[in-house]
Image (tube, grey):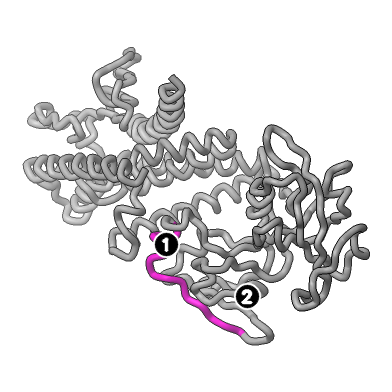
Amino acid sequence: MAFLADMLSYVGWVLLAIMILVFVHELGHFLFAKLFKMRVDKFSVGFPPRVIGFTWGETEYVIGLTPLGGYVKIAGMVDESMDTDALVAEPEDYEFRAKPVWQRILVIIGGVLFNLILAAMIFSGLKATYGEAYIPATGSMVVADSSIAHNMGLRTGDNLIEVNGKPFDGSHSYLGMQEMLLANPIVLRVEREGEVLTFEGPDDIMTQLNQTEGFYGLSFDPAIVGGVRVDSPAEAAGLLPGDVFVAIGDSAVAFWGDVSPAIQAQVQAGIRLVMFRPDSIAAAPDAATVWPDSMQRTGGTLYEVALNPDSTGGRAIIGVDQLFRMRSFGVGEAAVAGVVDTWMNTRLIASSLKRIFTGQDDFRENIGGPVMIARATKEAADRGAPFFWNIVAVLSITLAIINILPIPALDGGHLVFLLYEGITRREPSLKVRMVLQQIGMVVLLIFMVFIIFNDFLNL
């Protein structure tokens, strides 16, 4: 019973995301068609069989049972229905084929444009509503041992000065993974002990990230205590904001993300904690032990303290908060930030697809289908509304990019035919279009079966 409920939860969230994306995409086609006074016979979200529908004016509005897409049937257009009977007669003024090429192009790309607009609106709304959490610049980077960044040659303490040829000014304390993946290969310049060094990332960076669950190993998110809660075990042990975790129990700590797992891994009532306290902070905490001189760092002192964590909901809690700040956005600032996020994600997704289809990254490990999308959407929804809407925005951009590919049966295939007509002043033959449309649909069907099968293999 629990398994069934869990599956329904997965299906419910992914259906909601798909319905939103498909509705907006088809709305783009619909509104541009109406703008140019084309007759729209049907607006369908989902494919047949029909679940519910009604007719308003000249258009039938339908919700289909198969939630894998949708379509807008425009009079005088060769579409997924392959209906060509009405194309024998001379075109009527209200038909798609009777309109200028530029108007037909806007109708075809309308869905893609609306998907990008939706993404920008979501990103802008998230910025305006929730702001943006960021880690204040704390200086040098932290590099995990045996990570991708470590294998590139980067080391903890390096100061990043340039990313992919662009100066890094330290205005953000983390390096966006998007920017890290856009260059081919990734090139970072750092300053180490007064010397400037250049490092290149691997060509198959996406594949390696998938194999390590997205762990790059480079962070500006060190395990620095941002705040100590009142009457907490951390306060009783003498911890202060600015202390840096080095080890918790038997676990070495490099990033803030290492802190909680290390605490939960302790089975004993008391936790041994090794921390680094900079000279700028007050003297040693009470009952602390100075770590051996051989382990000391410059600019501060290593201490060992013991504390007894509280237990909340079966989890050990010591009462410290991460060092982060919130950046708020006005309406105009949020709108600009939303467009910037949309552009960055569009570049990233397009770059990733290029790397996959040119063989730089493993195809099977980097392509996800409905099953993987369902899992990612459910996980995002479980984390809260901002995460769900963020993944909807990313999926909207992905849908836009996939649809604009020059494959017959997709918007990009129709666009190629229209560009040919606009350049040559000659419409491609109906027979050629029909054959290519059928080939495109077969290719898409085979591809869909493959990625679904691949999804189950990667579970």
Distance, label 1 to label 2, CA atoms, is 24 Å
Judged from this view, the residue extending furthest toward the bottom is 195
The earlier-in-sequence mark between 1 and 2 is: 2
Evaluate whether residue 256 shows in this view.
yes
Residue 70, how many percent across, how many down?
Answer: 31, 30
Callout 1 amino acid: Gln
Residue on which the image places disc 2:
161
Where's the N terminus, which quadrant?
top left
Residue on which the image places disc 1:
208
Residue 46, how many percent across, how many down?
Answer: 31, 26
The answer to which of 422 and 145 lies nearer the viewer is: 145
Residue 203 shown in magenta: yes
The residue positioned 19% from the left and 50% from the top of the image is 421
State the SS at label 1: helix
The answer to which of 382 and 101 lies nearer the viewer is: 382
Where's the C terminus, which quadrant?
top left
Residue 126, how many percent across, how many down?
Answer: 61, 40
The residue positioned 33% from the left and 12% from the top of the image is 54
Position of residue 36 in the picture relative to residue 126 (left or right): left
Based on the displayed image, in which of its 4 quarters is residue 291 positioned?
bottom right
State the SS at label 2: strand
Contact between labelled residues 2 and 1, with CB atoms less than 8 Å apart: no
Position of residue 443 in the picture relative to residue 50 (left or right): left
Q: What is the crowding at mark 1: few (fewer than 14 residues within 10 Å), some, or many (at least 20)?
A: many
Q: What span is colored magenta in the figure?
A: 196-209
Q: What is the crowding at mark 2: few (fewer than 14 residues within 10 Å), some, or many (at least 20)?
A: some
Callout 2 amino acid: Ile
Evaluate whether residue 100 shows in this view.
no
The answer to which of 78 and 380 lies nearer the viewer is: 380
Based on the displayed image, in which of its 4 quarters is residue 217 positioned?
bottom right
Select label 1 or label 2 by which is in front: 1
